[in-house]
Every structure is written in structure tokens, then in C-alpha cells.
């Protein structure tokens, strides 16, 4: 059996895709898997690191900040369809899985035109336009949350939750081992700051501005900035900083408190590692779905949240307040742990294999 997995652009798309691929291989090691992403995006690096082959398309998304850059989009889309045709000719897939990101559209569209079974994973509570279009002809649509009938045909929806990397769900790394990995002090509380795989300017600037306050408050910091941000601070004591954390399982193990955006995959991971968290939702997400994601935890006393516009002044004081409130930390750990789902990847893999194998049996008859 040959399966293509299409999409990427951010860790929120790539890491669930890899989790699904790993679950498929665990269920049937003879399956051949090929990833298709966008040239120049992080999937071109992260997928090979996970041990899978990948092909890149000359495609880009809509640029909202510079409309003139969108002139070439129709030509890139047409070219990507020809590239997908060439890839399909060589690989001959039995199924196609889309995980979000603009590179998934031409792949699943061509697969549907050729009546190849297609599957979509929609992690967010508000579906993207491409997935909505593709969902009409998809074999199954896997969703991270309930209430997605307004976006997809009800009979196609399977609620699975969001796949979390096995390196996180199966991690046995202790806090001591995590802190040693980052060369930090076991006697101090540790704050993990992540704005997603591409970083978050608002969070970065708030931390940069008042980093000394955190350190003088007896805290130490693990800070993932993203590639586009260079910290102004030159502080080195009690601080580990880099553009990307390759082994997040060590960061989660080391952390006592987490500061993060509230994308669907970040929320899913934090539920699994059950850490006290302070969310700063990305305000420009479609239909403000990151605020919706965070609110679901806040309403269960499983997290705190502040708005993006409040972060510059209020983020660091709220971090210090949470670090000094042991009772609230304990409540958060208990409440967020109850929301964890660790088998979404297995559920998705099992459903895909059932549908594809069933279709092959029917075609033989």
C-alpha cells in the first residue's frame, strides 16, 4: 500500500502528519509513505529528520501583507498540479491524506479527480477554506473537536482528537533529565516560552523587555524564539534560548510553567504533558479560533489566558504571579490532564486502513 501525506508550513501541521505516518507504519510496516510539501518550508527539513521521503511543490499561500506578491499565485498553483501529476505517476498512491497547509490542496484535489481515497485531518475548531472545499469529496474527515458539522458533511466526520508526537506521549524523561539537557538549575522553577514553531513576536518582545524581572524573581527560562526573532537581551544566566527546540520532550519535562500561543496542536500537547500554562492567543487566526481553544481550558480552570494586546505589560507579571501560586498550579495540572488524548494517531491510522483495504476488496469483487 502506498500513501501520500500532504501539507505543512508549520509544526502544527507537520508533527501531527508525522505522528499519523508513524501510526500507519506501526500498524503495517509494509506501507510506503511519501510526504508532499512546499519547497522552502520547514517540512523539507523536518520530514527527512523523521525518516520519511518527501517531495516539494513550487507553491505559496496568499500573502495578506503584500498583495502584489500574490500576482504569481495562479501560475504557481497550475505548476503545482503538473508537479503532483508527475509525483503520482511515479508513486501511484492508494490514498492521500491532507493535514492542512496550502500544499495539501493540489494533492488532494488531483487524488479526488482520480477517485483515490482522500482523508483530511482538521485540527482547529474553525476549518480552513481549502479543507472545507476538499471535505465535500473526502472519504473521511478527522476532527480534533466536536461541532464541525457546519464545515463538513456530518456522515464523513470522525472525531479523533489531535495526534501528538509519540516522543511526547510516550516520554519517560524526568524533570531532572530535562533540566540537565538545557544546563539549568534543579532548585529553580523553570518557565518554557514557545510561540509555535515559527515564533510569536508579541510574546518574544514581552519576554525580551522584562527578562531581568523573571530572572530576579528566582525563575529560569527556556525560550524558543522562532527563526525571525533575535533577542536584544544579552543575559546568559538562568537562560536557554534558541530559534527552535528540536527535542520538545526535554523542554516539557524541564518546565514548571509554560507560556504559549493556543494553536490546536499546542493545546493537545500541553494536555498530554499536564503543565500549568498561560496562553496568549494569536489574534489574527481565522474566526479568532485560538481564543476559542484557550477559553475551553480556562473555563475548566486548566489554564490562564491574556490577550495579545495585554502581553507587553501584563505577561511577565502574570508569569511571576502563577509561579508563586502553588495551589493554582496544582489545580491546573489536575484539570488539564483530564483533557489529554494520546491515541488520536492510532484512531486515524486504523480508520484509513479500514477504508482503503475495504475499497480494494470491493474493487476485486
Image: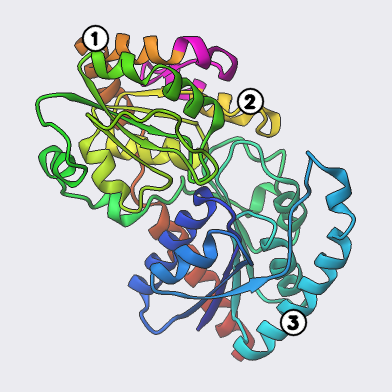
- Relative vertical location of residue 102 with respect to residue 215 in this rendering, above or below: below
**Span of residues in magenta:** 295-314
In the displayed structure, does residue 215 sit left or right of residue 91? left
Q: Does label 3 or label 2 sit earlier along the sequence?
A: 3
Q: Using the rendered view, name the quadrant where residue 302 is placed.
A: top left
State the residue at coordinates (39%, 50%).
164
Q: Nearer the viewer, mark 3 or mark 2?
A: 2
Residue beneath disc 1? 325
Query: Circle 3 is placed at which residue position?
Result: 85
How many numbered marks, from 0 up?
A: 3
| Quadrant in which the C terminus is drawn | bottom right
Q: Which disc, if any, is residue 283? A: 2
Residue 365, visible in the rendered structure: no
Residue appearing at x 21%, y 37% in the figure: 254
User: Which element is circle 2 on?
Assistant: loop
CA separation, marks 3 and 2? 37 Å
| Residue 103 falls left or right of residue 142 | right
Mark 1 Cα-neighbour bin, 10 Å: few <14, some 14–19, many ≥20: few
Q: CA distance from mark 3 to mark 1?
A: 57 Å
Q: Residue 239: give x, y in percent of width and height.
A: 27, 32
Q: Position of residue 197 (x, y in %)?
A: 48, 46
Amino acid at each position: 500500500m502506498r500513501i501520500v501525506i500532504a501539507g505543512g508550513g508549520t509544526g502544527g501541521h507537520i508533527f501531527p502528519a508525522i505522528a499519523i505516518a508513524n501510526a500507519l507504519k506501526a500498524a503495517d510496516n509494509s506501507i510506503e509513505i511519501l510526504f508532499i510539501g512546499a519547497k522552502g518550508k520547514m517540512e523539507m527539513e523536518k520530514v527527512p529528520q523523521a525518516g520519511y521521503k518527501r517531495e516539494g511543490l513550487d507553491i505559496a499561500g496568499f500573502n495578506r501583507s503584500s498583495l502584489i506578491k500574490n500576482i504569481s499565485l495562479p501560475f504557481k498553483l497550475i505548476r503545482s498540479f503538473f508537479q503532483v501529476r508527475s509525483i503520482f505517476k511515479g508513486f501511484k498512491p492508494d490514498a492521500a491524506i491532507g493535514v492542512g497547509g496550502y500544499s495539501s490542496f493540489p494533492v488532494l484535489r488531483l487524488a479526488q479527480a482520480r477517485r483515490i481515497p482522500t482523508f483530511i485531518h482538521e485540527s482547529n475548531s474553525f476549518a480552513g477554506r481549502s479543507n472545507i472545499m476538499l471535505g465535500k469529496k473526502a472519504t473521511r474527515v478527522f476532527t480534533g473537536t466536536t461541532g464541525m458539522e457546519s464545515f463538513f458533511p456530518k456522515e464523513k466526520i470522525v472525531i479523533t482528537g489531535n495526534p501528538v508526537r509519540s516522543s511526547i506521549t510516550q516520554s519517560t524523561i524526568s524533570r531532572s533529565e530535562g533540566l540537565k539537557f538545557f544546563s539549568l538549575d534543579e532548585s529553580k522553577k523553570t518557565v518554557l516560552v514557545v510561540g509555535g514553531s515559527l515564533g510569536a513576536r508579541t510574546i518574544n518582545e514581552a519576554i525580551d523587555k522584562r527578562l531581568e524581572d523573571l530572572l530576579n524573581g528566582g525563575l529560569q527560562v527556556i525560550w524558543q524564539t522562532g527563526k525571525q526573532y533575535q533577542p536584544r537581551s544579552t543575559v546568559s544566566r538562568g537562560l536557554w534560548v534558541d530559534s527552535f527546540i528540536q527535542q520538545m520532550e526535554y523542554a516539557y519535562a524541564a518546565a514548571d510553567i509554560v507560556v504559549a500561543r493556543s494553536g490546536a496542536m499546542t493545546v493537545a500537547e500541553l494536555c498530554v504533558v499536564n503543565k500549568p500554562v498561560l496562553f496568549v492567543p494569536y489574534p489574527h487566526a481565522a474566526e479568532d479560533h485560538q481564543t476559542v481553544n484557550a477559553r475551553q481550558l480556562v473555563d475548566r480552570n486548566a489554564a490562564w489566558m491574556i490577550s495579545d494586546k495585554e502581553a507587553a505589560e501584563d505577561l511577565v507579571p502574570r508569569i511571576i504571579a502563577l509561579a508563586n501560586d502553588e495551589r493554582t498550579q496544582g489545580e491546573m495540572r489536575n484539570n488539564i490532564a483530564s483533557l489529554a488524548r494520546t491515541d488520536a494517531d492510532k484512531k486515524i491510522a486504523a480508520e484509513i486502513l479500514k477504508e482503503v483495504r475495504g475499497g480494494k476488496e470491493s474493487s476485486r469483487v
